[in-house]
Image (cartoon, rainbow, N blue to C red):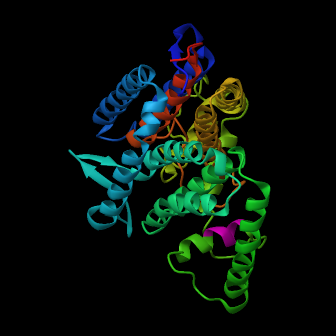
């Protein structure tokens, strides 16, 4: 029988809480900068405050529930999110031929973000269930199928970057799950020829891949191109973002005596979400951006430390999954804004606008805090 776990609120990770709170505050400021000329600024501020309060309330609720119980419910959470993803493809809001949102009580809801958290819990639960059989290929096949379902549904939206995020989380968790290297090697040996064949078919014979849009290909080609005269226009936003970040100089404009309100980031599309780091760079400058990255690094480091200190296998995997989730989103968002990566869309945790992204990130951190405050109780019962 599983050993009892006692709650010790003295062990709550203060660094995680402070780093998260600081990032949420920075995000709140950035959203006001992004929407300052919008007629809906007041309603946006109210929604953002409501999202923050809901997020903190959910963290408090999560802290009082044993994460083993939450993982036990993960199969239902997973099925619910899969159903909502499917429903989004049918009745979701259509924006530029993309269906990523479903409106609930007048509020846009992006299921793909919460699906990542639900998948982390379900994968941790299944890995724990198959713990003694992690040297079997069929276990990897089952886990891959579980991750593949939401990936396919998200690709159909289409939202390629979110599906790649799920793949990253999956690979990270599988690697740390103790899966046999022999099984992993066999899987790679089976998949690699397929990937090579697919590459040859696309690169040599110019065959169009289903569900991969032309604009997505152009973004990658623009990123790889060294020809300044190409007309792909896939990196136009990124060039504007770099200009905005560079204009922030060393200390940024938030403490500058410059009264000019026409900021460079104001002309960037999606500067409240996918390109929110352009606001961070221009408003806070190099020094401010450095400390913001430091907050993220500290938060992720503490998540990993909790995973190391936790003797519970399932708890370790949840922490690893949350760390992978945060790392990938941060790396991609900042990488896109600074043109280190091809242009794609992923929110920056705690800072980008969007209630689903904010609440999902807070729930993920709440799960790590939950694991951190629970220690083994020496009891045979």
Seen at 54% across and 38% down, the residue is: 349
Relative placement, left or right, of 91 versus 321 is left
Q: Where is residue 6 in the image (x, y as percent from the top left)?
A: 52, 14
Q: In this view of the protein, which residue sits in the foreground, 349 or 335?
A: 349
Q: Is residue 119 above or below residue 19?
A: below
Seen at 40% across and 36% down, the residue is: 36
Q: Residue furthest left?
A: 105
Relative placement, left or right, of 115 versus 374 is left
Q: In this view of the protein, which residue sits in the foreground, 202 or 283?
A: 202
Q: In this view of the protein, which residue sits in the foreground, 156 or 95?
A: 156
- Magenta part, dominant SS: helix
Q: Position of residue 115 (x, y in %)?
A: 44, 49
Q: Position of residue 229 (x, y in %)?
A: 72, 75
Q: Quadrant of residue 282?
A: top right
Residue 37 located within the stretch drawn in magenta: no
Q: Position of residue 26 (x, y in %)?
A: 53, 27
Q: In this view of the protein, which residue sits in the foreground, 230 or 220?
A: 220
Please indicate, yes or no, whether residue 242 appears anywhere in the rendered image: no
Seen at 52% across and 43% down, the residue is: 125
Residue 221 located within the stretch drawn in magenta: yes
Q: Is residue 6 above or below residue 219?
A: above
Q: In which quarter of the image is residue 358?
A: top left
Please indicate, yes or no, whether residue 47 appears anywhere in the rendered image: yes
Q: Residue furthest top?
A: 10
Q: In this view, does 184 lie above or below 67?
A: below
Q: Is residue 193 above or below residue 40?
A: below
Seen at 62% across and 68% down, the residue is: 219
Relative placement, left or right, of 287 versus 322 is right
The magenta span reads 219-223
């Amino acid at each position: 029988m599983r050993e009892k776990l006692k709650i010790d609120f003295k062990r709550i990770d203060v660094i995680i809480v402070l780093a998260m709170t600081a990032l949420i505050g920075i995000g709140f400021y950035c959203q006001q900068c992004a929407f300052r000329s919008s007629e809906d600024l007041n309603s946006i501020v109210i929604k953002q405050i409501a999202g923050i309060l809901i997020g903190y309330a959910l963290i408090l609720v999560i802290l009082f529930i044993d994460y083993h119980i939450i993982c036990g419910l993960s199969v239902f959470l997973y099925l619910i999110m899969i159903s909502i993803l499917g429903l989004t493809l049918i009745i979701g809001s259509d924006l530029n031929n993309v269906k990523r949102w479903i409106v609930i009580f007048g509020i846009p809801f992006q299921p793909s973000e919460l699906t990542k958290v639900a998948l982390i819990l379900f994968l941790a639960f299944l890995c724990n269930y198959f713990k003694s059989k992690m040297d079997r290929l069929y276990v990897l096949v089952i886990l891959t199928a579980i991750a593949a379902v939401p990936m396919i549904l998200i690709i159909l939206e289409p939202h390629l970057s979110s599906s790649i995020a799920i793949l990253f989380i999956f690979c990270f968790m599988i690697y740390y799950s103790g899966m046999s290297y022999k099984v992993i090697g066999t899987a790679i040996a089976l998949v690699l020829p397929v990937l090579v064949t697919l590459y040859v078919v696309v690169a040599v014979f110019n065959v169009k891949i289903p569900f991969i849009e032309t604009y997505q290909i152009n973004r990658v080609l623009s990123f790889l191109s060294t020809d300044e005269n190409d007309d792909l226009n896939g990196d136009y936003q990124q060039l504007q973002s770099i200009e905005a970040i560079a204009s922030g100089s060393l200390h940024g404009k938030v403490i500058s005596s410059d009264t000019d309100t026409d900021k460079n980031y104001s002309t960037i599309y999606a500067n409240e979400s996918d390109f929110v780091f352009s606001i961070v760079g221009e408003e806070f400058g190099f020094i401010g951006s450095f400390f913001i990255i430091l907050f993220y690094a500290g938060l992720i480091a503490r998540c990993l430390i909790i995973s190391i200190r936790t003797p519970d296998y399932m708890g370790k995997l949840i922490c690893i999954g949350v760390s992978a989730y945060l790392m990938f989103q941060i790396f991609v968002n900042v990488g896109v804004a600074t043109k280190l990566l091809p242009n794609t869309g992923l929110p920056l945790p705690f800072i980008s606008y969007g209630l689903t992204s904010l609440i999902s990130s807070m729930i993920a951190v709440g799960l790590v805090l939950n694991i951190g405050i629970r220690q083994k109780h020496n009891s045979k019962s």
